[in-house]
Image (cartoon, rainbow, N blue to C red):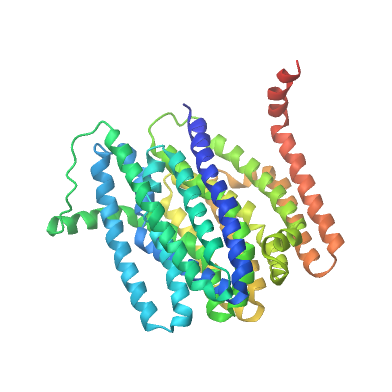
Amino acid sequence: MSQAAATIRSVGWLVAAQGSSLVLGFILWAYAARTLGLDSFGQTQLGVAVGTYLALLAAGGLNLLGISELGAQYCAQSYVFRIQAIRFAHTFAILAALTAAAVALPRALSGVIALCAASVVLRELWPEWVDIALGASRRVVLLRTVYFLVALSATVMVVQHATDAAVFGLILALAAVVVGVPAWLLTLAHLRRLRQPPVETRLQLGKGWGAEWTRTMRRALPLGAASALGLLLANADILILGALASTSEVAQYAAAYRIIFAIQGVGVALRLSSLKTLADPGPQDGREEFERSLLKVTLLASIVVASVAAMVAPYLISLAYGESYRGSISLLRILVWTWPLDFACTILLNMLIIRGYRRRYVTSMAAAAAANLAANALVIPRFGASGAALVIVASLALLLVVVFWLAQPSPRSQLLGYLPATVAMISGLCGSFVANGVSHVIGLGLLALAATGALAQLWRLLGSRILARVKPLWL
């Protein structure tokens, strides 16, 4: 199987997993937003944001290291046990610290945050990285689907009032455990079916264990640092909003961002699958050309999706969350433009990894993350959630410019090829701003113009290939 076909197949299953998370997860969070109200929903979103950082600290890059190294291991079972033992040790330490903080801080707020954070940390222990590394991405689809079904069913039956925020957090944490244990049993059964030498499963907690931990964490540190920088870029705004603004503003912002996260999951699937594919030995001919073509197509397609989402933003928010979240409409119109920027950055960052420019990768992420943190600290006290939305779009645009310049062999000569996509995106951004503040009709017109221009360029790139496949069906 060619590299492109392997990537597309693996991405397909991971996109299916994201699709499951999109549909069921969106229903879950929309129900929670409607039932809990602005303040309680804002507290749950702060807990999820805190848990995301704690989960990253628990993983320490070990999941990405495992995906890139597991396929080359002589004894996969032993490797999985070593990696997962370290992750369990990290996770239990973090959960103990989280419990202590929940007891020490005011219970009215910290209990909800601690439970929602614990649910994210517990999900980090799932064996998804093993399934992705072994090419069993279908189990990722099953795992996420079952989790959201369990959490959604329990939430609908139990959570009925705004005072049930802590109960909702407890449901998420218990669902992560209930689903995670059978998932590990299935993954271990798959590992046992592999033809490998016997494995010693007993953990050595003496001097040898410390040396193993040191060696493994040194290899995982660059990947963990890159993930931390990416998280600072994408998720710091909610924490800063929670510190500098009200929980109701956090709820409005998080409601819009829930829609954004659902589509951005496609980019996460692409990044994880590309790591696995690039780690496999095989012919690399045409890889760079393939990724440049993928960059143009992905950028244009995401501009079309962003333009349409900005046009129907009032209906999306009202249908999902109700009238009390109408403040999320203007935020969603701005945040949708993170889609094309994030997808383009994903592909360009992978190109940096392919060429071995890991320092450039980390440097570009660090620059964008630092700019994002500084701008949020300055803008949020004055402009609130609207300022946070503008900052994340500007930060991703900065990252895109930097990585485009670093990843392309001759960036100046290729600028003209991306001019149509740039014009379409500028038109769409202007349409979002105009629709929010000046004229709804003119703003919709600019958004429609952006979508039409991007569609025309997509047809120019793919039209002949589509016709070549469809034409035989007519004959």
Residue at horizontal 36 percent and vertical 48 percent from the top: 182
Q: In which quarter of the image is residue 70?
A: top left
Q: Which of 89 and 461 is in front in this view?
A: 89
Q: In which quarter of the image is residue 135?
A: top left
- How many marks on residues? 0
Q: Is residue 408 left or right of residue 331?
A: left
In the depicted structure, whether residue 190 falls above or below residue 228: above
Residue sitting at the far top: 475
Q: Is 165 drawn above or below residue 281 in the view shown? A: below
Q: In this view, does 48 lie above or below 222?
A: below
Residue placed at 59% from the left, 80% from the top? 246
| Residue that appears at 55% across and 70% down | 238
Indicate left or right for 357 with 71 as reference.
Answer: right
* Residue 435 in the image, given as x and y percentages of width and height: 80, 64
Res 360 seen here: yes
Where in the figure is residue 454, as x and y percent of width and height? 74, 45
Please tell me whether residue 333 is drawn above or below residue 1 in the rendered image. below
Residue occupying the far left of the picture? 207
**Image point (19%, 41%), residue name:** 199
Q: In this view, does 299 lie to the left or right of 68?
A: right
Is residue 347 or residue 37 the one in the foreground? Answer: 37
The image quadrant where one finds the C terminus is top right
- Measured as percent of width and height from the top left, residue 342 is found at 58, 54
Which residue is nearer to you in this view: 135 or 307? 135
